[in-house]
Structure formats: structure tokens, C-alpha cells
Amino acid sequence: MTGASMAGASMTGPTPSAALVIGASALAYGSAIWGARRFFRVEDRGARSGQRLITALAGIAMLVAWWTLAGSDPGPAQTGAASGLFLASTALFWMAVRSCRSRALAFAFSSGPPGRPLTRGPFAWVRHPFYTSYLLGWLAPVAACPGSTTLVVLVAMTAVYWLAARREEAIFDLGPWADEYRAYRRRTGMFLPRLAGSTRTGTRNGA
């Protein structure tokens, strides 16, 4: 799509394909916003700092993603891939919520003591399904509008969630559930499921 046609699309409103992707994104981003405001516990300085950091970065990233999508005209394959990723993000988020309804988790970067590791639902496949859900939501704009803008957003948010995950796992290593968590970590991936036969021993943090 040329620059002139993109400008025209932005002035007249998003194209039908872009509108479909934006609608799917609203489900994924709306779920994440609900989680940040209503689900995760914010009880210590680390969690409060994490909430401010991620809210600011994710807010900017979301606006950039919507601005980019509104000025695009993704083809059928791009529309399907991006919409599918947003829907997968939404589904995984709510599966993870359902798996820990009885024990709301702390917000990212919390320094509080962790509870016993969760191993049911999507936690049986990956150690941080919420972060995986969010990353799917940041990968979707890349699928719809591949380019430097959407790629920078994906890389930046991946770095934030990777740092948060590493911090959480380091806290587990020092807590009363350290041995159980190390065994859990050997059979699961950080953000992606482990392939059969890829289990490693002696790993300290992360996949």
C-alpha cells in the first residue's frame, strides 16, 4: 500500500480488514487492561513500580499499534493471522485467569514472597501464560503490518516481560518452593511449551 493510499485510509477511517483486526485487538488489549486494574494484586513497591511501568509502556504501544493498523490495509492472510493471534491472546488470558481464580497473582515485578507454583491449566505448558498472552497481542500487529514500528513495539514489550519473568523466577529460587519450582521449570518453557525430549536439568532461571 502506498503512502498516499495509507493517508487516505486514515482520513476516511480504517479499511474493513483493518477494522476487523482492530476489533480483535480490542478483545485482547481490553482483557489485559481488566487484569491490570481488577485481577492482579498490587501490594508492594515492586508491584506498584511494575504497574506504572507496564501501564505506561503498554498504553503507548497500544496507541501505536492502533494508529498503525488504522492506516493499513492488510491482505486476507495478514488479516487472518493477526486476528487469530489476538483471539489466541484473549483465549489464553482467560484460561490463565480461570486457572488461578482462587489465588490472584501479584502484579509484575512484585518483590513479595511467591505462593506454591501453579501447574494447572495453561500453567502446565508454560510458566508465564499471562506474559505469553500479552506477547501474542504484540505479535499480532507485526503480522498485520510488518515493519520497523510494530517490530520495535514487539521487541520492547518482550524485553519487559522477560525481565519480569526472570525476576519472579529468581524469587522462587530463594523461597520455600524452590525445589518444586526447579522441577516445574525443567518440564515447562518460560513463554513457549517445551518440545518433547528437550527437558534440561540444572537450569537456574528461564527457558
Image (cartoon, rainbow, N blue to C red):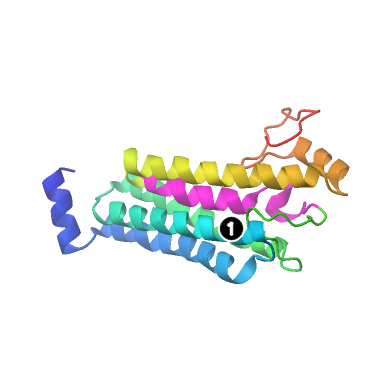
Image spot of residue 71 (x, y percent): 23, 53
**What residue do we see at 80% from left, 42% from top?**
173
Q: Which stretch appears magenta?
A: 117-143
Q: Quadrant of residue 104?
A: bottom right
Q: Quadrant of residue 103?
A: bottom right
Quadrant including the C terminus: top right
Left or right position of 75 against 7? right
- Report the front residue among 118 and 109: 109
Left or right position of 169 against 147? right
- The reply to whether the magenta stretch includes residue 103 is no
**What residue do we see at 32% from left, 45% from top?**
145
For badge 1, the amino acid type reads Ser
Q: Quick one: label 1, few (<14), some, or many (20+) residues within 10 Å?
A: some
- Report the front residue among 12 and 197: 12
**What residue do we see at 52% from left, 54% from top?**
89
**What residue do we see at 56% from left, 70% from top?**
37
Left or right position of 125 against 148? right
